[in-house]
Amino acid sequence: MKTTPHLCCLAIVFNISIYGQYNITKSNTDMIGAKFTYLVDSTSRTAKDIIQNGRFEVQKQNVANFGITKSIIWVKAKLINSSPKNYFKLILSYPILDEITFFFPENKVYKSYQCGESVPFNKRINKHPCYVFNISIPSGTSKTYYFKIQSSEQIIIPLYLRDDEQYTEDANNENLIIGIYAGIVIIMVFYNLFIFFSTKDKSYLFYVIYIGFAGLTQIGIKGYNFQYFWPDNPSFQLISLPIFASISGVFALLFAQEFLQSKIYLPKINTLAPIFTLLFCFSIWSALSNKIMLGFIFMQNTTLAISIYIIFISLISITKGQRTAKFFALSWIVLMLGSIIFILKDYGIITFNSFTNYIMLAASATETTLLSFALADKINLLSKEKELSQLHALELAAEKEKLILNQNAILEKKVQERTSSLEKAHETIQAAQMQLINSEKMASLGQLTAGIAHEINNPVNFILNSVLPLKRDIDDLLFIIHKTENLEQKENQQEIVLEIADLKKSLDIDISVNEIHKLLAGIEEGAYRTESIVKGLKSFSHLHEQHVKPFNLNDGITSTLALLKHKLKTQIDLHFEPGEIPLVECNGGNINQVFMNLISNAIDAVEEKHKNAKTGRITIETFRSGNKAVIVVRDNGSGMSDDTKKKLFEPFYTTKEVGQGVGLGMSIVYGIIESHKGSICIESEMNIGTTFTIELPLGDE
């Protein structure tokens, strides 16, 4: 055999045993399982000790099966070449063994070559899923070979001999069989995955995942996963089999539950499914925790248990009249029979041949196909049931049509009567709505009128109260003027001058003149205040402007604040911070109504929370943001709950007491802003405050 850098030499005395020899003739290069001897080593003896002093036992089975064991299995094979050929392939056809050390004689010493799942695949001399060893035995001579084998899975040793032509032919045949199996699995996966995306039926998804991981498991048992998918990752290869098989088992359970509806029809038996799932999860955890042997044992036993469980529930489903369960039960029975034959072959009860070697792949492919048929049959059954249901629905529809035709005349008459009633009711509702809206507007107008009356009353009272003293002072001045006008007509002017002087002194003319100036100044101030209120009211109402035109928002807020001055108590600190914003195309009267409602509500909220404390605050800001004018009204009043915020703009919703409004104020605000293609949003927290933010489009500039 050709050595590589991975081979190490053992200077061991060449020793040929008389037991378990195999004679190579021209036509019998075949299975040599019953021709080798073996030794079970539980003490980890050295290779030199085993080869020199080991007591090997005769292997009688065609395929040796040592089960799952922590011991080291030694195999000794003496080969006598009676054929004309000198070169052969010694093949150990069980790819899932963890560690294999092959000892071969060369120049009267034994050299070793290591392979197995724990060694990267690319380090193998022969790139084959099985373990292939090149041996050279000159014709007419014999050689003895040794194998040292350890594994966390069960140790099965199907050992056979092939010449180069036979080896190539077997490899091609095996690749063809694996390719056909993989093709069947891939086709079923993509076909049923497409159906899942079309139907959204979870049965197809569980089926796809199940057969996908089942396929990986079967191909992994044959060693092809290691060869093609992760050849440089032996650590993952060691744990892949229990993990893939466990995932496949979990989704087999889910598929069975979904397909057979066992949760509904077999609730008691279905309680076992979570237990099996936990066992599979434990197997995966064990493998990931490097307890591979434990994970493999749990996976193997649980897989056997769920196979029996699924066959059992599918047979019960058949007895309960589920037609689709027939294909399902048949598929799992086929898989179970294939597994039984495969296991009997491993234990040497039946012959190891191509049929028994590949029976598991054939059973798995057949199961995959039958399950796909089961899903298709389920769809066909559902389609037929749907057709029957539609046919029944059509029959019912025909019967109902007759009843409808008979009732049409009566219904038409009733519809006409109800239409007339509804029209009257609609008119009544519209009238009631208009009355309520007018009531809301009148309530607002009443508050506004009361405020204006209060504001005008002060200067008017001042003017009225100033008229009498002003008249009295003017009469005194007129009296003195009259005395002065008669001065030229009198002869005794000196006496009249003295009389006038006494009169001025008695009437306090200087004081009267000063009082007249003050009274006139007060009357003037009252007149200006009255004029200011009238201008504010005119600016607020814009009664003569019913169409849209450029409007100064800052002026609108200023006029609104002037009209609400009577509501502002000394304990409320109000700040207006006008920003530089262009004129907005809008209906100024409507926009002022918005300002009136928002600011008035803010005043009420602040008064409700702060009472007579001087801690209330209202802030009004205007600014430009992009192509929008923004108005922010912020207060630290009582705030609103989430429920109130949701309903705030609904018509007739109010938090005020009965008689203080009908709940249309904020609804009107929302309607005005919406009609101007603007937006209004609320931020509010209970006992913290409320912020209203209005955005109005500026249009093209």
Image (cartoon, helix red, strand yellow):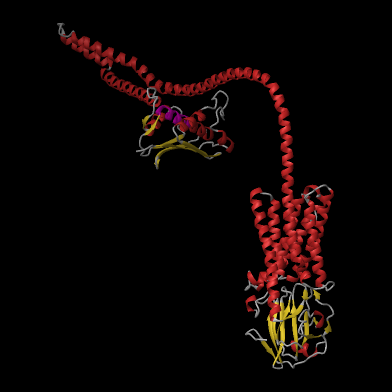
User: In the image shown, does 234 or 106 lie closer to the viewer?
Assistant: 106
Residue 521 left/right relative to 373? left
Q: Which residues are magenta?
A: 587-599
Q: Main secondary structure of the magenta part?
A: helix
Q: Is 524 on the left or on the right of 308, as rendered?
A: left
Picture coordinates of residue 386, whole percent (x, y): 72, 41
Q: Is residue 46 in view? A: no
Q: Quadrant of residue 596?
A: top left
Q: Position of residue 203 (x, y in %)?
A: 71, 52
Q: Determine the residue positioned at 54% across, 22% down.
A: 433
The total of numbered circles placed on residues is 0
140, 421: nearer the viewer: 140
| Residue drawn 66% across the image and 59% down it | 187
Quadrant of residue 44 within the rendered picture: bottom right
Residue drawn at x 70%, y 21% as measured from the top left: 406
560 relative to 63, above or below: above
Percent x, y of residue 504: 24, 15
Image quadrant in which the N terminus is located: bottom right
Q: Is residue 637 magenta?
A: no
Where is residue 362 drawn, in percent x and y? 75, 64
Residue 594 in view, yes or no? yes
